[in-house]
């Protein structure tokens, strides 16, 4: 890989959200599984460096530094660890994402602190220009292959694609009428009209929007994301879609209400502009949550949940246990 300077850029950047980890034994346990499996399978070439970025508060950073000392002991590769202050990033982010928060956040969506859930959306404006590619990863992952291989997926982006992301593996975006919903990220209860394309699908019964693969557009899951920051900066279309007036227009067109932050934004713009997204194979983000199977979607669940072939990364979303190897 050659950077702008002509020098070979041998850094691989990965970013994880890492807040309130000091207060959660469960998050600490997930982080242990993620890092130990990443280290176990991680192999890099001579001179290459894996740069691990954590978006964190002070208390979590202290816990994180201590845990990383232990988890990285057996690493066979060079690495760097960088902590980013969540408050400082939120400050930069808020003006860019404020307007979209009301469409894709819980409650009134006006909470300043919720802006951080949209970090990936505006990462190309937040990180320095010299950073051209980054992968964003959840903590509730288990790696079964070399994370270096994930970065090779950047080279498979077709022209015009700015983000690589796997599909959502539950009928989250199908729409629902039940009056309950479990959201482990926000721990709140929502009403049935809150998220998804339910109303749009009712008005457009033949639509692919929210329908299962391979022909439908089930939406995206944000647990593993490849952000081509250089392409995001260069894409006129992508940056137009970030503008409040265009977000409002699409949200209105699709009658979209969400509460999953960046994942909702990418899902919505992906319905209109699928060419912006490289579709990462499900094996790179094999989500395990089955919540919707038992909440009104048993009949269609498998159409969404099915993922053939070897699993490279398990995603134990909604606190689902990850199987042992
Ligand atoms: N996260 C965090 N602190 C929290 C909750 C979540 O840093 O208190 C981060 C963490 O990286 C986590 C990600 O946000 O993996 C998304 O949350 P989670 O994986 O629990 O959501 P799910 O995948 O179950 O929807
Ligand atoms: Mn997750």
Image: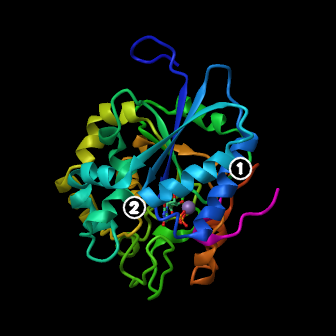
Residue 282 or 54: which is nearer the viewer? 54
The residue at 59%/55% (across/down) is 214
Residue at 44%, 18% (x, y): give it: 3
45 sits to left or right of 238: right
Q: Which is in the foreground here, disc 1 or disc 2?
A: 1
Scheme by which the image is coloured = rainbow
Q: Earlier in the sequence, mark 1 or mark 2?
A: 1
How many marks can you see? 2
Is 5 placed above or below 34 here? above
User: From the viewer's perspective, is 30 left or right of 308?
Assistant: left
Residue linked to disc 1: 36
Residue at numbered disc 2: 264
Span of residues in magenta: 314-325
Q: Which residue is at 70% across, 69% downward?
A: 321
Answer above or below: position of 2 versus 323: above
Answer with the quadrant where ligand 2 appears in the image. Answer: bottom right
Q: Specify whether residue 242 is painted magenta.
A: no
């Amino acid at each position: 890989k050659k950077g702008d300077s002509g020098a070979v850029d041998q850094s691989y950047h990965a970013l994880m959200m890492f807040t309130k980890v000091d207060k959660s034994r469960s998050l600490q346990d997930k982080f242990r599984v993620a890092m130990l499996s990443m280290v176990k399978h991680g192999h890099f070439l001579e001179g290459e460096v894996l740069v691990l970025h954590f978006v964190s508060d002070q208390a979590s950073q202290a816990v994180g530094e201590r845990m990383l000392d232990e988890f990285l002991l057996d690493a066979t590769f060079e690495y760097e660890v960088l902590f980013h202050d969540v408050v400082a990033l939120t400050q930069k982010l808020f003006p860019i994402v404020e307007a979209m928060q009301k469409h894709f956040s819980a409650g009134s969506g006006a909470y300043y602190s919720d802006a951080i859930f949209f970090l990936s959306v505006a990462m190309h404006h937040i990180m320095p220009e010299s950073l051209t590619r980054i992968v964003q990863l959840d903590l509730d992952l288990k790696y079964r292959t070399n994370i270096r291989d994930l970065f090779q997926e950047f080279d498979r982006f077709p022209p015009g694609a700015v983000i690589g992301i796997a599909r959502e593996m539950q009928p989250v975006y199908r729409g629902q009428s039940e009056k309950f919903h479990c959201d482990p990220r926000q721990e709140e209860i929502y009403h049935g009209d809150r998220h998804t394309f339910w109303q749009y699908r009712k008005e457009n019964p033949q639509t692919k929007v929210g329908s299962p693969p391979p022909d439908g557009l089930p939406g995206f899951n944000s647990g593993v994301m490849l952000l081509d920051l250089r392409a995001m900066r260069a894409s006129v279309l992508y940056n137009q879609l970030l503008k409040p007036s265009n977000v409002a227009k699409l949200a209105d067109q699709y009658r979209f209400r969400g509460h999953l932050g960046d994942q909702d934004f990418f899902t919505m713009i992906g319905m209109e502009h699928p060419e912006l997204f490289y579709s990462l194979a499900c094996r790179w983000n094999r989500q395990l949550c089955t919540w919707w199977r038992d909440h009104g979607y048993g009949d269609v669940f498998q159409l969404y949940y099915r993922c053939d072939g070897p699993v490279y990364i398990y995603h134990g979303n909604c606190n689902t246990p990850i199987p042992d190897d």
